[in-house]
Every structure is written in C-alpha cells, then in structure tokens.
Image (cartoon, rainbow, N blue to C red):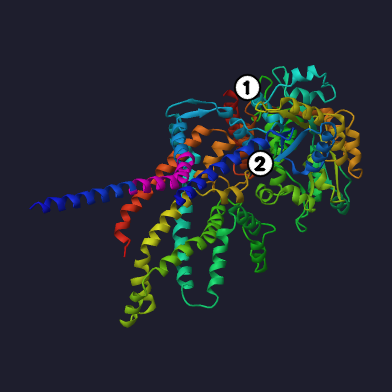
Amino acid sequence: MKEVPLQTEVKSAKRIKVSSLAKTRKRSDYFWAYLMIAPTMLGLFIFYLWPIVQNFYFSFTEWGAFGQYEWTGLDNYKRLLEDATLVQAFKNTIIYIILTVPIGIYLSIIVAVLLNQNIKGKSIYRTLFFLPVITMPAAIAMVWKWLYNADYGMLNYLLSLVGIKGPQWVSDPNIALYSIIAVAIWSGIGYNMVIFLSGLQGIPKMYYEAAEIDGAGPVTVFFKITLPLLSPVIFFVTIMSLIGAFQVFDLIFMMIGKSSTALESTQSIVYLFYQHAFVLNDKGYAAAIAVLLLAVILIITSIQMVLQKKWVHYD
Amino acid sequence: MKKWIIMLLTVVFGVLSLTGCSDSDTASSGEKDGKVEITYGFWDKKQVPAIEEIIKLFNEKYPDIEVKTEITPYGQYFQKLETAATGGALPDVLWMNGAHVVQYAEGKVILPLSEMAEKDNYSLDNYPESLIDLYTVDGDIYGIPKDYDTTGLWYNKKIFDEAGVSYPDETWDWEKLKEVAKQLTDEEKGIWGYAALMGNQGGYYDFIWQNGGYIISEDGKSVGFDKPEAIEALEYNVSFIKEGLSPTQAQMTETAASELFSSGKIAMMFDGPWMVPEYKKNPDLNVAVVPQGKKRAVSIHGLSNVISSNTNHKEEAWKFVQFLGSKEAAEVFAKTGTVIPAYDGTQDAWKESVPNLNLQAFIDGADYSVPLPSVKNTGEIWQYETDVLKKAWSEEISIEEAAEELAKKANEALAK
C-alpha cells in the first residue's frame, strides 16, 4: 500500500516535469516562431493593414494640396452614387472580368492538360507559355501597343495582306477594351497553367489506371476524373484571377493614352482610382472608390466560398 | 548554447544591416567626407548633356557641393513631386513650370527667393519680364527663370517643293494655312497637310488668343472657353480633322504627331523649340512663325529653378540656383540648342547653334507672346481640357457642347 502512492507520486512528478518541460519548450518555440514571422507580420501590418485602415478614414475626407485634408463625412460616398464615369468604369471592369477569367481559365486548363502528356519538348512549350509571366507588364503592353498600331502595326499589316483594313485596335472606343482583354488572357495563361500543372500532377495515378481497366475513353477520364479532382485548384485560380481582374490597371495605363478617345470605354475602377488620387489630387474620393472596390471583392469572394460546396471536390 | 549564439548573431546582424541601410540613406542626402550633396530634379532627358556640363562648371567653382540629378519623365513628374512634397522629400533644387508655381508657393513647399536675392545682390533684370511675373506669387519671386519657349510653325520643305508651294512666312494667316494644308494633303501618299494637335500651349490656346479670346479672365474667376471667340478658334482647329487635312485624334494618339511629322507624313505642325534636337536630324524640316488670326499671338512659357522648403542645404541650393540662372549656364544651354535660354543676350548663341533652322521664328514670337495662364488649379483645368476637348476632337460631341462642359467644369475648379 505504501508503495503505491509513492509510485503515483513519482509518476505525477515525472508527469509534471514532462509537462512543464513541454510548456517551456512550447513557450520558447512560440517565441522563436513569432520572432521569425515578425518581419513579415510587421510588413503586413505597416504596409497592408494600416493603410487599409487609413484609407477607410480618408474616404471620409477631402484633400487639398500637399497632404492637407478635412473631414467631410459621407460626401464622397454620395458622390459615388451620382458618378456616371464610375458606373462606366464598373461596366468596363465587369466586361473585362467576364471575358478574361473564364476564357483564361478554360485555355490554361487545356494547355496544362496538353502539356501534362508525354510529348516531345514539353518543357520548351511550358517555358514558352510561361514567358509572358516573367516579362514586365509594362513591356508586354508596349510591345502589344505597337502590334496594335492602326497605321504601322504588324496586326493591321498582316490583315492588309489579305485585303482587310484593320480597325484602330486601341483607339476605337468599341474595340479597345477587347484588345486589352486579348492581351490580358494571353499574358495570364502561363501563370495559371503552372498552377494547373501542379494540380494535375497531384492527382493519384491509380484513378487513371482504374479507369483504363474499366475501359473509359480519354474524354470520360477528363470529365469524370481530371476535372473533379482538379476542382480545388480551379477554385483557387478562379478566386485569384477574379481579384486580379478586378484590380486591372497596368495594361490600360500603358496601352491607352491619356488623351485617347477610347479612355472612357476602357478605364477600370482602379484606373479611375489612380486618376482621382494622383492626377486630380482628389484623394478622399479616390479612397472612397477603393473602399467600394474592396467591398465588392469581399462580397464576390464570399459568394464563391459558399458556392464552392456545390462544385469543389476535396479528395 | 551554440544555437542561441547563432540565433543572436543572426538577429544582431540583421538589425545592424537594417540600420546600415538607413545610415547610407541619410548619408546620400547629406554630407559625405566634408562634401555637401544636393539633389536636382527635372524631367527632360534631352537636356541631360547640357545639365551635366553645367554641373561640371559649377563644381569648378564650388568643388564641395556635389549635385545629384533625378530625372522623372514629365508624365509622372508632378505626381511624384506632390507625393514627395507631402512627405517632405522633394529634391533640393527642382524644375518648376508656370502651371504649378502658384500651388507650390501657396502650399509653402518651395522657398521664396527674394530675400536671398536681395542679400546677394542677385539681379532679376536679366530675364524677360513676363517670366519674372510668372514666378512671382504675392510679391515674392519663387523661381529663377531657366529658359523660355514659344511656338513655331514647323514644316517639311520636301513636301512643299514637291507640291510647288512656297514656304510659310510671317504674312500667313488662318486662311492661308488652311489653303496650303489642302494643297499639300495627299491621300494616296498618306500625307496630311497639317496636324491639328489637341494641346493647349502651341495649340488651341494660341488660336483662341489670336482670335481675340481669353483662357482665364483677369480676375481669375472664370474661363473663356465658352465665349464665341474661343468656340470659333476651336472650330477652326477641328475643321482640319473634319476636312481630312489632319490625322484624326485617334491616329495621333496611336502614333505621336511629332513622329508622323519627322517621318514626312505631315507637312506642317505647331511645335516648340524643345523639339529642335529631334527635328534637326531631318534636313527637310524648318520652322517659321505661327500664322496670325485677327491678331498676332503665340503662347510663351518658361521653366524656372526653385528650391524646396524641405532642403537641409538652403545655402548650397541657392548657390546652385544662382549658377543655373547665370550667363555661363545659359550659354551652355544656348550652345547645345536644347532650349532658348532665359538670360538676356544669350539667345543669339542659341539661334546660331543650329544654323540651318530658322530659329529666329521662336525669338520673334516672344514680342507678341502671351504667357500661359497660371492659377492654383491650373493642373486640374488642364485635365478637364484633355477629358472634354478630346471628345470634340474625335467628333463625338460638337464644339459648343464641349466648350460649355469644359467651361462649367473649369469654373467649378476655379471657385474652389
């Protein structure tokens, strides 16, 4: 009898020792963990979260020259409601999104599936498709601007060889937005392709082997195995592309001149934000536009998060 | 233990390297081995060789002041300045134009120079009066004039010769310009007689003045875009496009008119002396005074060098600004033919820098020139001009509608 409590004592003492060791171990782990992520976290707070808070505050102010501002309450938001240019900018952005995101994803899945086969020189093709991604958007825009040039561009030159007089790709208000969309799709395929490729390679081979044994053709395999198992990746790419498309700016800024006749029919929300913040020095109103954009992206992303339950299959 | 030490060292070195960065940063804008470094901000790449030479001459006099140049393309120049001024990070010395000087002076981000000029007996009489006026805000001078520019009618001799038309001269008026533009336009060869630019200086401003109109009223409270004289002038401009004598607005945004002109696709166009370095490369090009309307008028504008309020080296910056405004510096600018130097008496040297061009046309213009209007919101009004007038230039809306919309927006900006 005497021994028993002793044993338990020893045990519990051991346990205490172990658990306190675990605790100190844990505490020091946490310390190091926090220390290691501190630079990133600091950067995140200082350069992302704090500006968002500030931007929200500034959306209630009106700016004068050189950083002076005054509180004007909801004035900027009232202006938002009456701004016809903003409506046009939203329309442009939505057309841009509706075309670039689905077509971009569709094309990059096809390219990824094709380049996932055992074909000769596939790494060369992969590199070629990825090249636009590592090229600066500004450079892409400049090159395309020249290809698109109505009088001296290559595109219209090629069209003229077959007797067609090409349009003014980036100056005609009815066409310019679509010209930009084409470049955006082209330059975005590579990035999505790489993500899809990694997704494709993550699909276990056994499913394909089983399908082969059951005698499924390549089309069935694609729709019944590849696509469902790729759906988490498609979901991820959709969300990222949507957010990216909402924020389109550089291509428009570079390809459409400031005095271009097509500016109104191409300018996106972020372009309008830039115009107000940095050209017209109307920073308060620009902040309100940014808040609106943030809200729209937030809502659309949450809708997607809800809808994903219906179509995304996690393995 | 070992791990601890390694960690500690990593952190310490990390922190050290961070402070190291900021150390070198402050050094770059401050003192370095007894030398003072000041920064000089400007936008025109074409003037870099002249400015470098001037800095060299300056250093012969003041070896202890090092000047670092910061070039920002014009498109972003004032946006960058605005942000820099808010953060107190303007270059010590910088270029200023007439459109922004009032805003910058009233915002107290550039220094008044009158006091220092008086103390050093620095004479302002050596510069054209219109430029001194342009940079005087509330009785204080803020910028020392650097150069000025008027507009000329550039033309392509080859196109004139082929069509057997005599070159433009001082007798030309609006009618003659139109008539010759018609004669020179050749659709088959893809040659336009004239480029109806949608620009204010050397564009519709000049035409509005020539027609007896005004841009901003004398009390600075309203604009004159919707007055009959202005509407008529704008209509005259756009008529070149309507009649097919000029490239369309869309064509001119896709390929700059200056490029079309220097490659022989346009026979005549308005442009400034800052294009001399570019246009002198093509021996077919020459320049004459702009044609007259109801009266003679041409816009004049000039840049000046100003000192920012956030400078830590006011004395050194002032010395540099004085030197930039000196005859010596003006002569360097004159010699390279980049701009018309503002310093009186150095213009002849500029004229002779490119003898085969009739540069006298720009200097003649100064006699009947009108300075570009400058108010606090000039920049905003310019933006509205672009936004609204381009719709008229591309024939989306009528001139009257555009003039009315522009006047309304600009008047609202002036009332702020």
Q: CA distance from mark 1 to mark 2?
A: 28 Å
Determine which residue is flagged by label 2.
B75
- Of the residues shown, which amino acid type is indicated by label 2? Gly
Closest to the observer, B296 or B317: B317
Closest to the observer, B156 or A147: A147
Which element is circle 1 on? loop
- The answer to whether dots 1 and 2 both sit on one chain is yes
Instruction: Tell whether A245 sits left or right of A211.
Output: right
Q: Image quadrant of residue A27? A: top left
Whether the residues at callouts 1 and 2 have beta carbons within 8 Å, the answer is: no
Local packing at callout 2 (Cα closer than 10 Å; few below 14, some 14-19, many 20+) is few
From the image, which quarter does the C terminus of chain A lie in? bottom left
The tag on residue A9 is none
Q: Which residues are magenta?
A: A25-47
**Magenta stretch secondary structure, dominant:** helix
Q: Image quadrant of residue A31? A: top left
Residue A245: percent from the left, percent from the top? Answer: 48, 52
Residue mark closest to the camera, 1 vs 2: 2
- Of the residues shown, which amino acid type is indicated by label 1? Lys
Q: Is residue B50 above or below residue A66?
A: below
Residue A28: percent from the left, percent from the top? Answer: 37, 46
Local packing at callout 1 (Cα closer than 10 Å; few below 14, some 14-19, many 20+) is some
Look at the image and say whether residue B61 sits in the magenta stretch. Answer: no
Q: Chain of mark 1?
A: B
Residue A19: percent from the left, percent from the top? Answer: 26, 49
Instruction: Tell whether B248 sits left or right of A210.
Output: right
Residue A52: percent from the left, percent from the top? Answer: 45, 38
The tag on residue B221 is 1
